[in-house]
Image (cartoon, rainbow, N blue to C red):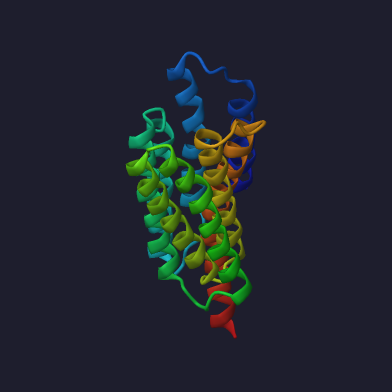
Amino acid sequence: MWKKIISIFTVVMAIIYIFFIPADPVSTKIIFKLIPMLLIILLAFKQSAGESKKYKILIMTGLFICMLADGLIYWFIVGLITFLIGHIWYIVAFRHIKTATIPKRAAVLLIVYGIAMAIWIAGTLWTSGETILAFAVILYIVVILLMGWNAFQTANKLAIIGAILFMFSDSVLAINRFIVDVPFSDALIMISYYGAQFLFAYSIHTYYSANRKNLLK
C-alpha cells in the first residue's frame, strides 16, 4: 500500500517539477528537482530485499549520489563528476547480482552506440580545441557503457530498462549541451532520468522475488 502511494506521489512531483516549476529562482528549481529523488530513495527503502540486502544498500547509495548530482549539475563539471561516481556505484551494484553473460546483440549495440557517441560528441569537441573536455566525454561514455553492460548481465529486466533510460538521458544531455539544441530536451532528459532511478528502486524487489522463486524450486 505504502509503495503505491509513494510511487504515485513520485510521479506527481516529477510532473510538477518538469512541466510547472520555472527556471528561476534556481534554489526553488533545485528543491523541487530533488523531491522526486527523495521519494524514490524512500521507495527503494520500502522494497523487500531478503538475502539481497547488499544490492539494496548499493542501489540506495547510487540513488543518493545521483540526487546530489541533480543539485550539483548547475555547476556542470562538479555535477558531471558526481554523476560519474553514481554510474560507477550502479556498476558495482549490478556486478553484485550478475547472473548471465550479456546477449551478443546487446553487446554489439552498446559498442556501436559508444563508438558513434565518441566520434560525434568527443570528435566535435576535439576539432573545436576542447581537448580535455573531449577526453572527459570519452571517459564518461566508457563508464555509462559499462553501467549498461553490467545491467544486461543481471538479467533483471527493470535494471536493464533503467540503465537504457539512464543512457538515453545522458545522451540527450550531452547532445543538447555540446552539439545541437534538442527540442523538449529538459522534458526528455528528466522523464528518462526519473524513470531510470524509479526502475532501479523497483529492481530491488524484482531481484528478491526471483531469488525467492529459485529457492522455492
60 on left or right of 17: left
- Would residue 55 be seen by someone viewing this image from the given angle? yes
- Would residue 202 be seen by someone viewing this image from the given angle? no
Q: Residue furthest right?
A: 183
Question: Residue 5 appears at what percent x and percent y?
Answer: 62, 41
Q: Residue furthest top?
A: 25
Q: Nearer the viewer, residue 59 or 177?
A: 177
The residue at 60%/44% (across/down) is 192
Q: Total label count?
A: 0
The residue at 36%/29% (across/down) is 75
170 on left or right of 187: left
Q: Nearer the viewer, residue 37 or 152?
A: 152
Q: Which quadrant would residue 105 be assigned to in this image?
A: bottom right
Q: Nearer the viewer, residue 7 or 93?
A: 93
Question: Residue 166 appears at what percent x and percent y?
Answer: 54, 49
The residue at 39%/49% (across/down) is 86
Q: Is residue 136 above or below residue 20?
A: below
Quadrant the C terminus occupies: bottom right
Question: Residue 103 appears at what percent x and percent y?
Answer: 59, 75
Question: Residue 186 appears at what percent x and percent y?
Answer: 59, 31
